[in-house]
Structure formats: structure tokens, C-alpha cells
Amino acid sequence: MQTDLRGRDMITTQEWTRDEIETVLDVAWDLKRKRALGESHALLRDKVLGMLFFFTSTRTRTSFEAGMTQLGGHAMFIDSETTQISHGDTAKEIGEIVGRYTDGIAIRQCDWDFGNKYIREVAEASRVPVLNMQCDVYHPFQILADLMTIMERFGRDLRGKTMNVSWAYAASYQKPISVPQSLILLMTRFGMNVRLTHPPEYKLMPDIMQQAQDNARLSGGAFEVLDDFDAGFKGADIVYPKSWGALLTTTDNDESARIGKQYTDWITDERRMALAQDHAVYMHCLPADRNVEVTDGVIDGPQSIVYDEAENRLHAQKAVMALTMR
Ligand code: CP
């Protein structure tokens, strides 16, 4: 267990050691237990988290805000559109100024080829920890909650378990690639057999792919890439099919929509779930395009653990805040 995490940024799990991540999980389960028992755990009394959003959110916003209140502090919602950020406050100024008012700055900035750079610029100027609530490259808190949820189902030793991280069709919008990228980065560090399944136009960033490959080698796991939707499900213990944009192929929304239309049959349904292990679980970070990306029968069915996943956002985030913002 690591006890010296005060002041650390959480921009990607890749910058935290496996031991540090295990510490986050230990604390998360302790805080989850305390909440279940109604035990007070005001570890951040009088502390303030500034939450800066450039993009909409349901789970991230509500879980960070609830988490800070449960830890005895306050979460301040800052909307980029209704502040002077939209009139020119720079990343450096946000880091310097909001960092002097608060004890942590959390940011969601998902703009392609910009979000991660923005968050790192704020972190460079900030005297308090910066927490990435999702950028164009990473979604670390989602993936910490996912790992916690998987361990609750399968135990802490995940060696040999097969996880299928798959693209799925959605009509709503070009979703960021941060979830699949963060999944392949973290799950390959725990000795799992990680499959990434996608049509050819939906590649992830080459350096992230290389890091996932390296992680798998170091952990004794495996990392493979498939382009057959059904094959991804076969024999898997965990399936995580979700949509993402063809951002490495095109940043043009219309062209992306045209590409996506070729793959409308990439929907998770009961037939596909039956290809996985009988005990397999269905995961999705939400929101999902119901009956486009996944059938109601699957997402509301007995193999779905999407609500446990969403709940664990709260506990994992509280753990990171309690460890870094003390
Ligand atoms: N999964 C997730 O990050 O949800 P929100 O976009 O609602 O925050």
C-alpha cells in the first residue's frame, strides 16, 4: 500500500504504479463499506474541488459532487460557457487562479487533439492536484471504477480472464476514444487477456496500442486485435462493447456518420452474449444508445453490471480525492 499520494495528479492511470492503483482500490472499498454502514468519513472537511466542464456529463458530475460532500468538503461546478473561460481565460490562468481558491481541480475537456494538452497545461500551473474527468485520450476514473467492478465479480487476481473491449454502432454522436484507450491500458496491467475488437476505421492511437502491448508483456497477460464483432464475444469473461468515433480516420462528422452506417449490425444482443462464457458480464460506461448499441434485453438483463459500474465511480473517485487532496 502506498501512503504518499498527496498532491498527485490523476491524468492517466498509466502514470500511477500498479501498487498505487491497488491502494486506490483498497481505499475505495473501505469508503464503500463505510457508506453502506452509514459511518462518517469526512476526510476532506473544509476542502474544495473546482469541477470545470467543457462537455456535458451525468455520472461524472453527480458522483464527484456527491463524493466531495460525503468527504466533508464542497464541489464547485464551473461551466466553461458561463465563465470568462469562453472569453479568453487561459489554461495557465485557470491553473494558477483556481488552484489558489481550491484544493483540487477536476476537468472534463474532450476536444480532439486539445483536451489532454489543456489539462496538462492547467496541471503545470496548478499548486493543487488536477484530476482528469475525461479528455480526448483518457477517462481514468471510469476505468478505475470498471476495474473495481470487475474485481468484485471475479476476485483481485484477474490473470487469465478474457476481456473484450469492442466497438459498437451508435447513431448519436462521435464519442471520444478515451474509454477504450484507458481500458486497454489498465486491464493489460493486471494479467488479463485483453481483446480489442473494431472495424478497420476505428483504430486507437498507435502509442496507446504500443503501451497496451508493453503492459500485457510485463504483466504476463495478452493483447490482441480483432475485426470480427462475433469473434470478440467468443469465450470472453467480460464484454465491454461501446461506440467511439472514427477519429483516427476522419474528424469530419458527416464522413464519420457515413463510415458508421456500414456497421449498424454491431449491436450487442442476446445471441452475441450467448457466445461469451455463461458467467460473462456485460459492461458499459453509459450513456448507451439503447437498441442501437445494445438491446434492452442485454443492458437490463442478468449479465449486465452497468449500475454497479456507475456506482463505483463514486467510491473510486472518493478514494483518489481522499488520497491526493488531503
Ligand atoms: N460514463 C461517464 O463518464 O458518464 P457521463 O458522461 O454522464 O459523466
Image (cartoon, rainbow, N blue to C red):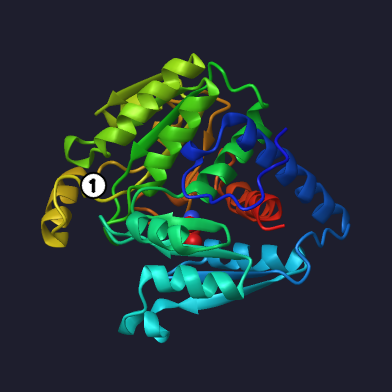
Between 34 and 208, the residue placed more toward the observer is: 208
Image spot of residue 135 (x, y percent): 39, 56
Image spot of residue 82 (x, y percent): 41, 86
Q: Label 1: which residue?
A: 264
How many numbered marks, from 0 up?
Answer: 1
Between 174 and 102, the residue placed more toward the observer is: 102
The quarter of the picture where residue 252 lies is bottom left
**Along the horizontal axis of the image, is 81 left or right of 63?**
left
Name which residue lies at 16% across and 54% down. Answer: 256
* Quarter of the image with the N terminus in it: top right
The quarter of the picture where residue 76 lies is bottom right
Q: Is residue 269 visible?
A: no
Q: Element at badge 1? A: loop
Name which residue lies at 24% across and 29% down. Answer: 227
**Along the horizontal axis of the image, is 72 left or right of 9?**
right
**Along the horizontal axis of the image, is 302 left or right of 169?**
right
* Quarter of the image with the C terminus in it: bottom right
Image spot of residue 128 (x, y percent): 58, 61
Q: Is residue 126 above or below residue 216?
A: below
Image spot of residue 218 (x, y percent): 47, 17
Q: Is residue 124 visible?
A: yes
Q: At label 1, which amino acid type do we have?
A: Thr
Name which residue lies at 68% across and 51% down. Answer: 315
Between 293 and 43, the residue placed more toward the observer is: 43
At label 1, counting other C-alpha atoms closer than 10 Å, the crowd grade (few under 14, some 14-19, many 20 or more) is some
**Along the horizontal axis of the image, is 20 left or right of 139?**
right
Work out which residue is located at the far top of the displayed protein and give it.
220
